[in-house]
Image: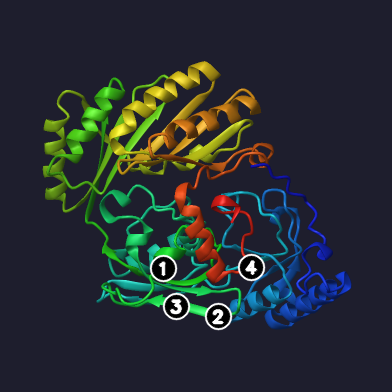
Amino acid sequence: MSRTPSNKLESRSSSNPMGSSGAPSTSLTLAKTAWSGIRTLVGESRLRSAVSGDAIDGVLPENIAEPASASELAAVLKIASEADLRGIPRGSGSKLGWGNPPRAAHLVLSIGRLNRVLEHAWGDMTCTVEAGCTVADLQRTLAEHGQRLALDPLWPERATIGGILATNDSGALRTRFGSLRDLIIGITLALPDGTLAKSGGKVVKNVAGYDLAKLATGSLGTLGVITQAIFRLYPVPACMRSLTISTKDTRAMQSALHAILDSQLAPSSVQIRAATSSSPSVDLLFEGTSTGCDAQAGQVARIGAPFSVTEADGSIWREREPLFAKSPNTAVCKVSLLPADFALFLDYLERISESLQFSWKLIAQAVGVGLLRLECGSLDSLRQATLGLRAHLESSEGSLVILDCPLELKNNLDAWGSPGDALTLMKSVKAQFDPAGILNPGRFVGAI
């Protein structure tokens, strides 16, 4: 799918909200009136002109709005929608480059001022938090009562709650606690028509009604702007212990992984690390009491007797972040595959990397989801590598999503790959929530 986004916004006359009978000047008047209304609503200092650092994949918006509340954000969105202004939700911007380049971006809707922990119901082990709060700030607040949100997303000091929900960034702890869809129990969304839609509640068991929380998680802000979320919580463990099983080849790694997953062990995280021309390893994180962690470590030593088992530093759980270091002709991809296929995929990686002369590094969770960094000698070889790996994964019910790559490549290569038979349903859901295509146009699966 070829795209050529421009640093200049599309002409107002090309998206006339009055229809073919309306004059272009009417569209311009509507836009001018909308900007005036937004400025009045949020305040003069909270609507500013965009600068180069605000561009999304080379597309520069006109203005940045910083609403002070969920209701104010919804009102801004309604004004923008009525004037046919395309909106891009933004938290800290740590994952703003994920997805396809937008077809248009007139207004960035910043949730930075919606940054409070509204309630920590520590007796019920739930919390209510605004979408602009960073993960680290939330965790510090919860830790005061010995609790935590049991996930470990990328860049927690920067990443916002809204951002990790929009991208479904869960991390290695999903092995034990599940993904964000398993942790979220309530959500509030600002919809393009100005509605604040709420789903779920403050109790852990809540199954009545439409599960808007799970639907919005991973939707990349294409259905509505997340303003608030409610999560189930877990205790902060008294002890944490990390171990690494080093193996000699991919078959041994797969054998070790199967042995761990088939055992009575209860690790919080199971992580596979592999790279070009190096032996793969399996990392394990155990949490609980000191006695419990010692007992599990002893069992790992017995299971891993054919391999090398060593104590590991806790920093191994943050090794996903350096994968995103900027470098020419480099891409970072999210891959999904069956856990039983790790060895086959690593063998294929070795073969295609030798053929196309590129290096790679994979950090994946045992559930079959991981991050893959590719470093190639040219943009053409990078394109061949991503397409080849995508075709290989999709042929066995897996996927490859490009998260970060040179803009020149992204403009001419769909970030998401094949949507399968789900695209019709996705478009139908999008039409229900955002019929005019106001939010993040073109950035999601199938250019939704």
Q: Residue at x 63, y 65 (%)?
A: 437
Q: Earlier in the sequence, mark 1 or mark 3?
A: 3
Q: Residue 183 placed where, x, y %?
A: 33, 63
Callout 4 amino acid: Leu
Classify residue 357 as left or right of residue 275. right
Classify residue 103 as left or right of residue 255. right
Q: Count how many numbered circles sit on residues in the image.
A: 4
On residue 109, which mark appears?
4
* Quarter of the figure that contains the C terminus: bottom right
Q: State how far apart marks 4 and 3 are (Cα).
A: 19 Å
Q: Nearer the viewer, mark 4 or mark 3?
A: 3
Q: Residue 5 placed where, x, y %?
A: 73, 49
The residue where tag 1 is placed is: 213
Asked if labels 4 and 1 touch by Cβ distance under 8 angstroms, the answer is no
* Quarter of the figure that contains the N terminus: top right
Callout 2 amino acid: Thr
